Image (cartoon, rainbow, N blue to C red):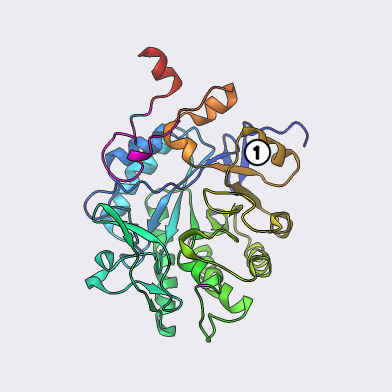
C-alpha cells in the first residue's frame, strides 16, 4: 500500500486501465446540429486517451433532459454514430471511455425544452442558478413537478440511453446523480417536497436514483455501470438537511447492486472541499468496489489518499482541458498549462483541441 502510485495499471470491472488517473466529465458546449458530437470531439478525446479512464461530458438522455446549449445527446441514431467516431478514436489510442448519462431536471430553460414546455423536476421549486442558452447565461425557467406516472418514462430513457452508449462503442456508462441535476434533485429535500413514494423519507428520495441505476445495470451489466454523486455540493442551488444519512443509504444500496464504481465529488463542485462537515470515509467503507475521488486533487493529495486506502482512482477535471498529456506531465513533475476561461464553453477548436502537448511545444 505504501508504494502505490497513480501511474500503475488498475483493474476496473472487466477492464484493465493503464493508470489510476481519470478524466472527469467536462461540459464544453460544442455539439453540432442535432446535438451530435463532431470530428472536433473525436480529436479532443483522443488527445486525452492516456488517461486511465475518460468519463465523457454529460450527455442528455432525451431532449427533455437537456439544460444547456450545444450539449450532446445519446437518443438519436445520428448521435450514436457521432459518438462512435469518438470511441473509435479513443480506442485507437489505447484509451478507455465511459459515457455520462444526464437529465438536468429543473436546470434548464424553456427555449431548450420540447415545444417550449417548462423543465421537469421533483417539485415545482425553481433553482437559483443560471444556464447557458442563446449564447449567454440566463436564469433557469420555472419547472413543473413530474407526475407519478411520468417517472417510469424517465427510467426508461436512462435505460435506452445506456444501451445506445454501448452501441456507440463506450466501455461503460456513468449515471449522473450529482451537481443538482434531476437525480440529485430527487435525493435532496431542498428541491424535493413531494409527499408520494418519491419524496419525504431518505428511502423515498433515494428511490429514483436507485431505480435508474438498477435499470441501467439490467441493460448493460454491473461491470459497465458507475454512478456519480455529490453529497454536499450546493451546485445549481440544491441543498439537503440530512446529506450524511441520505448518501450513506444511497451508497449502501449501490453497493448491493454491485456497480463497477462510485464517483464522489468531495465538497463543493469545483470549490472548497470542506464546504460542510461530511464523513466521506464512511461512504468509502460502505462501497466495496472502485471508489473514484473527485474535487481539488493534485498529485500529492491523490497519492496520499491512495496510500491511505481512501480511494482507488482520482478524477482530474479542468487540468485536462489545457493539458492533453496531463498524465505524462504529472509523472514527470512538469508544469501545467493554465486554461483560457474565455474558450471553455462553445466555439471552435480554439481552447478545445489546440492546447499543445509538451512534445508539440518543444517542436515549435
Q: Is residue 313 left or right of residue 91?
A: right
Please name the residue that numbered disc 1 is placed on: 302
Relative image position of residue 9 (x, y in whole percent): 62, 35
Is residue 22 magenta-colored?
no
Q: Is residue 206 left or right of residue 94?
A: right
Q: Quadrant of residue 260?
A: bottom right
Q: Residue at x 75, y 31 (%)?
A: 3
Label 1, residues with CA under 10 Å away: few <14, some 14-19, many ≥20? many
Q: Residue at x 49, y 64 (%)?
A: 216
The quadrant of the picture occupied by the C terminus is: top left
Is residue 345 magenta-colored?
yes
Relative vertical location of residue 261 with respect to residue 115 in this rendering, above or below: above
Q: Is residue 332 visible?
A: yes
Relative image position of residue 296 (x, y in whole percent): 58, 43
Relative vertical location of residue 300 with respect to residue 252 in this rendering, above or below: above
Relative image position of residue 187 (x, y in whole percent): 55, 71
Q: Is residue 69 visible?
A: no
Relative vertical location of residue 19 with respect to residue 145 in this rendering, above or below: above
Q: Residue at x 52, y 48 (%)?
A: 270
- For the view shown, which residue lies furthest in the top direction? 363
Q: Is residue 10 left or right of residue 358?
A: right
158 and 57: which is toward the camera: 57
- Chief SS of the magenta region: loop
- For the view shown, which residue lies furthest in the right direction? 2
Q: Which residues are magenta?
A: 338-355
The quadrant of the picture occupied by the N terminus is: top right
- For the view shown, which residue lies furthest in the bottom direction? 195
Amino acid at each position: 500500500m505504501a508504494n502505490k502510485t497513480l501511474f500503475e495499471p488498475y483493474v476496473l470491472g472487466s477492464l484493465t486501465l493503464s493508470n489510476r488517473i481519470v478524466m472527469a466529465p467536462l461540459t464544453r458546449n460544442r455539439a453540432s446540429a442535432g446535438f451530435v458530437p463532431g470530428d472536433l470531439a473525436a480529436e479532443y478525446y483522443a488527445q486525452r486517451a492516456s488517461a486511465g479512464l475518460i468519463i465523457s461530458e454529460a450527455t442528455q438522455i432525451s431532449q427533455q433532459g437537456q439544460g444547456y446549449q450545444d450539449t450532446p445527446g445519446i437518443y438519436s441514431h445520428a448521435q450514436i454514430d457521432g459518438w462512435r467516431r469518438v470511441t473509435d478514436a479513443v480506442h485507437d489510442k489505447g484509451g478507455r471511455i465511459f459515457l455520462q448519462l444526464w437529465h438536468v431536471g429543473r436546470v434548464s430553460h424553456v427555449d431548450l425544452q420540447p415545444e417550449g414546455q417548462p423543465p421537469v423536476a421533483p417539485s415545482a421549486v425553481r433553482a437559483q442558478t443560471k444556464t447557458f442558452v442563446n449564447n449567454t447565461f440566463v436564469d433557469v425557467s420555472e419547472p413543473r413537478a413530474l407526475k407519478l406516472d411520468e417517472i417510469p418514462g424517465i427510467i426508461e430513457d436512462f435505460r435506452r440511453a445506456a444501451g445506445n452508449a454501448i452501441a456507440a462503442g463506450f466501455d461503460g456508462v456513468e449515471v449522473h446523480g450529482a451537481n443538482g441535476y434531476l437525480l440529485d434533485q430527487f435525493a435532496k429535500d431542498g428541491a424535493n417536497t413531494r409527499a408520494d413514494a418519491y419524496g419525504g423519507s431518505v428511502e423515498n428520495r433515494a428511490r429514483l436514483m436507485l431505480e435508474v441505476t438498477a435499470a441501467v445495470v439490467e441493460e448493460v451489466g454491473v461491470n459497465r455501470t458507475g454512478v456519480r454523486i455529490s453529497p454536499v455540493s450546493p451546485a445549481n442551488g440544491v441543498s439537503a438537511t440530512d446529506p450524511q444519512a441520505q448518501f450513506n443509504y444511497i451508497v449502501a444500496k449501490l453497493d448491493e447492486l454491485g456497480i463497477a464504481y462510485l464517483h464522489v465529488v468531495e465538497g463543493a463542485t469545483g470549490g472548497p472541499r470542506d464546504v460542510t462537515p461530511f464523513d466521506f470515509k464512511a461512504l468509502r467503507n460502505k462501497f466495496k468496489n472502485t471508489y473514484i475521488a473527485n474535487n481539488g486533487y493534485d498529485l500529492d493529495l491523490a497519492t496520499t489518499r491512495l496510500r491511505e486506502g481512501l480511494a482507488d482512482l482520482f478524477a482530474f477535471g479542468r487540468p485536462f482541458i489545457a493539458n492533453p498529456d496531463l498524465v505524462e506531465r504529472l509523472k514527470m513533475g512538469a508544469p501545467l498549462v493554465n486554461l483560457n476561461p474565455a474558450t471553455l464553453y462553445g466555439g471552435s477548436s480554439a481552447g478545445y483541441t489546440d492546447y499543445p502537448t509538451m512534445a508539440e511545444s518543444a517542436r515549435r
